[in-house]
């Protein structure tokens, strides 16, 4: 058992909690309106024409990525939630139907193209796309990325990573989960039936995390802060991962 020390609680009204950035702003979605908040001050962004927001990437608060899968499109926002760029993959010379999008380094986006079942890199300044991986037929259940690596778990719960050169590494087969967050190359947080635990594949160890909430909608983790989102708000915990 891993004990989580409660830091604070913030009451919010939201459908989805995205997480915190390095400046202490938290991001939420309510009625498909994307919101950035800190100390009671907030900024909003909405784009009714593109439908439901599928995925948000806040790793770079100066270039926030909103993915609208139903319209095969991405919006890039600055730190004031102003539109920097709109990308419609359907207009690209290379046929792309994006099922996964995340920010990468060097003005690029990770894109999983369902047409060829490959991971590619899209240069959003040059409007150029190139596939970098081999095809993989099993569909993605969960994905996340950082500037150098694209991670995903397929429908059979196999966890993989792909680097910028297209090298795919098989990590491990995870247990069944409701939600998962990859925190390092070898560790992930996972929840099933509102029981939260951390698994270390290097040490082959699993720790259940003790929190106050019996049920929750979502969770996020950044810099040893575990944030638990319920229908009432966010509870932040300090945890020290072994």
Image (cartoon, rainbow, N blue to C red):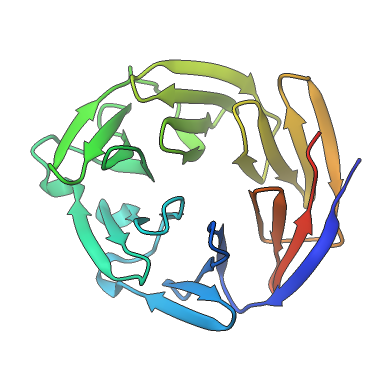
The answer to which image quadrant residue 24 occupies is bottom right
Question: Which residue is at the far bottom?
Answer: 40
Residue 114 higher or lower than 26, as above or below: above
Q: Is residue 195 left or right of residue 117?
A: right
**At which x and y percent is residue 114?**
31, 34
- Name the residue at 39% across, 61% down: 53
Q: Image quadrant of residue 232?
A: bottom right
- Find the residue positioned furthest to the left: 93
Name the residue nearer the viewer: 64 or 28.
Answer: 64
Q: Residue at x 33, y 52 (%)?
A: 69
x and y, in percent, of residue 71 in the image: 26, 56
* Number of numbered markers: 0
Q: Residue at x 53, y 62 (%)?
A: 23
**Residue at left offset 30%, top offset 72%:** 47
28 versus 60 height, above or below:
below
Residue 44 lies, with reference to residue 178, above or below; the image says: below
Q: Using residue 118 as the reference point, say whether residue 191 is left or right of it.
A: right
| Residue 214 seen by the camera | no
Q: Quadrant of residue 83?
A: bottom left
Residue 96 locus on image (x, y percent):
21, 38
Residue 125 visible within the image: yes
Asked whether 71 or 28 is in front, the reply is 28
């Amino acid at each position: 058992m891993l004990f989580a020390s409660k830091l604070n609680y913030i009451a919010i009204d939201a459908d989805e909690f995205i997480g915190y950035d390095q400046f202490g702003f938290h991001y939420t979605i309510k009625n498909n309106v994307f919101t950035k908040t800190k100390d009671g001050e907030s900024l909003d962004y909405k784009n009714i024409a593109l439908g439901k927001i599928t995925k948000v990437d806040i790793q770079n608060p100066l270039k926030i990525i909103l993915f609208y899968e139903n319209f095969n499109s991405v919006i890039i926002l600055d730190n004031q939630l102003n539109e920097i760029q709109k990308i419609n993959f359907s207009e690209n010379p290379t046929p792309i139907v994006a099922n996964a999008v995340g920010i990468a380094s060097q003005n690029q986006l990770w894109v999983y193209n369902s047409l060829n079942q490959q991971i590619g890199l899209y240069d959003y300044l040059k409007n150029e796309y190139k596939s970098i991986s081999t095809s993989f037929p099993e569909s993605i259940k969960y994905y996340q990325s950082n500037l150098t690596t694209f991670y995903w778990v397929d429908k059979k719960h196999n966890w993989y990573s792909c680097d910028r050169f297209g090298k795919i590494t098989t990590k491990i087969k995870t247990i069944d989960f409701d939600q998962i967050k990859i925190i390092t190359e070898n560790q992930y947080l996972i929840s099933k039936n509102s029981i939260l635990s951390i698994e270390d594949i290097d040490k082959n160890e699993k720790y259940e995390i003790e929190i106050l909430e019996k049920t929750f909608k979502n969770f996020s983790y950044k810099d040893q802060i575990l944030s638990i989102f319920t229908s009432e708000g966010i509870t932040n915990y300090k945890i020290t991962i072994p």
